Amino acid sequence: MSGVVTLAEELAEMTRLVEGDDVHSAFDRFTARVAGTIPGCAHAALTVRTHRGDFETVGTQPVDLLEPGPVTEALIHHEPRRLDDASADERWPTFSTQLLLAGWQACLSLPVPTGERGQAVLTVFSRDPDQFGEASHDLVMLLTLNAGVVFDNVSLYHHSTRLIEQLRTALTTRATIGQAQGLLMQQFGYDSEAAFDTLTRASQNSNRKLRDVAASMVEAHNNHTFAAVLQAFNLSAPDLV
């Protein structure tokens, strides 16, 4: 019973999302706990698809996991791949040679169930052969389910964070542009539309983004250099102050 409780505690800890973690930090924390949970496992790695569509492995790894072998096959076929003894298995000679040279003899790769297929693979390594039998396979399978939760939660968290930051930036930009419009309306007696057209013309004249032009005008007004900035943007109107 204590073993079940301990495993449950480990799973709960693995899926805990710490605010402020980036994706790599969360995965590093996860793989470290996997290595400490699986009998015979001395190292664990997550290979994930990046936003560019290629794959990379989180953290320092004993071998190139993108060399044709169990990891790449698990990614391509969405099926587990096991290498029980690198010194005897002939399926992936280059991968096996790299594994042996690094001091490892066995590994097990399982696809991580995420929102999209083929997004990640969890691989566990052992320095001894034949370490990942049925019991270990089932435990690693259980952990990959939690890896999927970690993967989806971290991705969702940071996607949401990016959306919030983008919304905050958009609101700040809108407010700044509104301030600049108000300054132009006060300076030239423009209506809102004419003031916005003037901002647009300033953006085109200076080859700068509209939000940057607006920010420059607001800052210049605060620094009492508004007229000089208008002239720098090639803007003119009667009664410049």
Image (cartoon, rainbow, N blue to C red):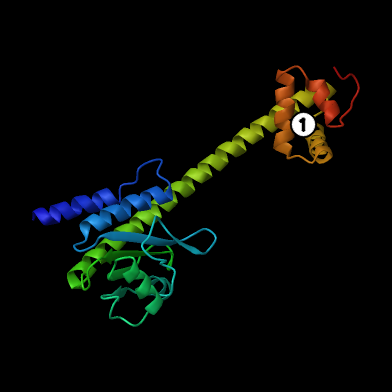
> Quarter-wise, where is residue 134 in the image?
bottom left
Q: Is residue 106 above or below residue 14?
A: below
Residue 172 position in % (x across, y down): 61, 33
Mark 1 — residue? 192
95 left or right of 209? left
Classify mark 1: helix, strand or loop: helix
Q: Position of residue 178 (x, y in %)?
A: 70, 30
Whether 19 is drawn above or below 114: the answer is above
Residue 240, percent from left and from top: 87, 20
Q: Report the front residue among 225 and 161.
A: 225
Amino acid type shown at disc 1: Ser
Residue ranking furthest to the bottom: 90
Identify the residue shown where x is 74% and y is 20%. 221
Q: Nearer the viewer, residue 92 or 112?
A: 92
Q: Work out which quarter of the rendered image holds the C terminus and state it.
A: top right
Horizontal arrangement in the rendering, residue 194 relative to residue 169 (left or right) = right
Q: Quadrant of residue 84?
A: bottom left
> In screen coordinates, is 210 left or right of 3?
right
